Image (spheres, grey):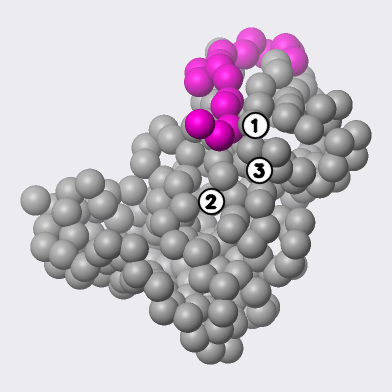
């Protein structure tokens, strides 16, 4: 079945640093999504990407939909302590399709 | 405000008991989903429903059951056949192509 690859499982950065996360797949997706999950809560949508090559920003977050439609990256600039959490990528193939999720990257930010 | 409500937030189950987790949405979304989350495992799909009175098994349906009698409601029952039910359970609904909206989750613990 389809799988999304996110690695490493955990990342540790210093407050103020930038961080980049990749998500790759062996399958093509029509939509890429990035979610953040705080402890004990449900994931919240950060950025949605709908076209190959699309680059979208949301505050300090920037994400890109890969040209091959098999990958995406998320960049967080000037990290702050509240960026701590689990970041999931997800791909969608079509209408009413269930999402395929990566296993997530746990981000820790040292003050 | 539109959203997804999961209840209860915390649930304790004795060995051999069935328990039901509630999921209600007022987003008018057709498709709803149940995921299980374990540390380091990411999100695993239990069941999903694309329309009222219809649902399909996901990747880990054994020991679980669902119903979809109303568009707004998609309850999940964790049966005594589920041997390792302690986990965080997330309900979501889908509006294509915008992605999932998640509830805030239910943490189930076997005592």
Query: Can I make out residue A33 in this image?
Result: yes
Please report contact status of discs 1 and 3: CB closer than 8 Å, yes or no.
yes
Q: Which residue is mark 1?
A: B25
Give residue A52's mark.
none
| Residue A57 place in picture, x, y as percent | 35, 69
Find the residue positioned furthest to the right.
Answer: B53
Q: Are marks 3 and 2 in contact (CB under 8 Å)?
A: no
Circle 1 Cα neighbour tier, 10 Å, few/some/many (<14 / 14–19 / ≥20): many
Tell me the element at label 2.
Answer: strand
Q: Nearer the viewer, residue A68 or B31?
A: B31
Residue A104 lies in the magenta stretch? no
- Mark 1 and mark 3: span between their CA atoms? 8 Å
Secondary structure found at label 1 = strand
Q: CA distance from mark 2 to mark 1?
A: 23 Å
> Residue A1 sits in which quadrant?
bottom right
State the residue at coordinates (37%, 37%): A39
């Amino acid at each position: 079945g389809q799988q999304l690859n996110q690695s490493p499982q955990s990342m540790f950065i210093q407050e103020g640093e930038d961080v980049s996360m990749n998500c790759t797949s062996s399958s093509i997706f029509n939509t890429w999504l990035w979610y953040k999950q705080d402890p004990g809560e449900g994931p919240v949508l950060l950025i949605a990407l709908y076209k190959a090559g699309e680059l979208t920003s949301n505050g300090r977050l920037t994400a890109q939909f890969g040209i091959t439609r098999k990958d995406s990256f998320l960049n967080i600039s000037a990290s702050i302590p509240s960026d701590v959490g689990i970041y999931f990528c997800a791909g969608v193939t079509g209408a009413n399709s269930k999402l395929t999720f990566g296993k997530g990257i746990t981000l820790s930010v040292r003050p | 405000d539109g959203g997804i409500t999961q209840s209860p937030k915390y649930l304790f189950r004795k060995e051999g008991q069935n328990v039901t987790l509630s999921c209600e949405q007022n987003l008018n979304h057709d498709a709803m989903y149940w995921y299980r989350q374990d540390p380091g495992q990411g999100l695993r799909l239990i069941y999903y429903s694309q329309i009222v009175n219809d649902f399909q098994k996901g990747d880990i349906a054994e020991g679980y059951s669902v119903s979809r009698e109303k568009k707004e409601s998609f309850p999940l029952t964790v049966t005594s056949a589920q041997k390792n039910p302690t986990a965080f359970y997330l309900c979501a609904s889908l509006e294509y192509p915008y992605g999932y909206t998640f509830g805030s989750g239910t943490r189930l613990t076997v005592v």
